[in-house]
Amino acid sequence: MEKRFLPPAEAAAAIVAAGERILTQPASRTLVLSLLAGFYIAFGAQLATVVTSDAAAHLGLGISRFLGGSVFSLGLMLVVICGAELFTGNSLLTKAALQGRIPWGKLAENWGVVLFGNFLGSLFFAWMMFETGLWKSGRIGEHAVGIAAAKCQLDFGAAFVRGILCNWLVCLAVFMATAARDVVSKMLACYMPIMAFVASGFEHNIANMYFIPAGLFIDGTLGGQTGGLTWRNFFLGNLVPVTLGNIVGGVVFVAFAYWYVHLRGNRQQP
């Protein structure tokens, strides 16, 4: 009888086995899959922007964040079920490197290609949303600018810690989705942690590659009047600390922790 889910040790081993794909996967395929992941996360992010644009005024801040996180989880569901390469989730590839199944150089190469592809996908999707004309004026456009401005005004330490907490949950979502054996269970595994990180106000670097450029594009039509909302603050004030935090959250608190608990004694020599 087929198992309904994998226990943690088997899920950890399955993630290691899946990580071996980077040994033979062409860079072109990795790039296309990472572009798709950028699109998928942006789909969830734009939907969260729409849903939360007036929810707080009518339902309260907490419910608004809950609804935003609920619809944002669409992004990871698409990544996990349809297949794509997401930088934050690929923090779990560290398990395969720790286990001696892939070289650390290949891991760094994968991260570089995936981060670049995720950025291009997210940025292109933000431009497409701008070109739809749906957000250039009105409440949703103002809300998109407000989201971007708030993210650019975070100090380095706060952005870093929020990045840690975010990817801790994202990687747990991927871990649980790996353990799940059917599509509905994988969707639920994605939903709960992603809803939790968005509702809590944590920071996801790939989501911010959509949120902040979308706000910048809209603010540009207003003459760039929103204080602190600049491309420089996007890269240095948000993207750098959040990305570093995301790496720590995924690598230390999920990949290393479960490798140490379940796989360390079976490590292979590279």
Image (cartoon, grey):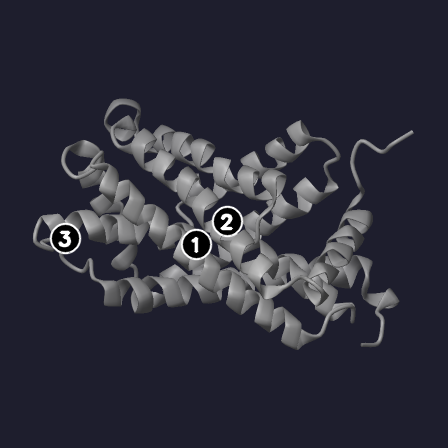
Crowdedness of circle 2 by 10 Å Cα count: few (<14), some, many (20+)?
A: many
Q: Secondary structure at mark 2?
A: helix
Using residue 119 as the reference point, say whether residue 109 is left or right of it.
Answer: right
Residue drawn at x 44%, y 37% is: 72
The residue positioned 23% from the left and 27% from the top of the image is 57
Q: Let me know if residue 203 appears in the view.
A: no
- Amino acid type shown at disc 3: Gly
Residue 94 falls in which quadrant of the image?
bottom right
- The answer to which of marks 3 and 2 sits earlier in the sequence is 2
Identify residue type, mark 1: Ile
Q: Which of 42/98 is in front? A: 42
The answer to whether marks 3 and 1 mark residues whose Cβ atoms lie closer than 8 Å is no
Amino acid tagged 2: Ala
Q: Residue furthest right?
A: 1
Label 3 residue SS: helix
Please report the residue visible at 20 percent of the width from the left and 39 percent of the height from the top.
141
Residue 37 - label: 2
Quick one: 212 or 198, which is closer to the camera? Answer: 212
For label 1, the residue is 206
Distance between the Cα atoms at labels 3 and 1?
22 Å
Question: N-terminal of the two: label 2 or label 1?
Answer: 2
Q: Is residue 8 above or below residue 199?
A: below
Which one is in front in this view, the residue at disc 2 or the one at disc 1?
A: 2
Viewer can see residue 35: yes
Which label was assigned to residue 220? 3
Asked if 155 appears above or below 185 in the picture, the reply is below
Residue placed most toward the observer, 196 or 148: 148
Residue 125 numbered mark, or none: none
The x and y percentages for residue 140 are 22, 34
For the N terminus, the image quarter is top right
The quarter of the picture where residue 163 lies is: bottom left
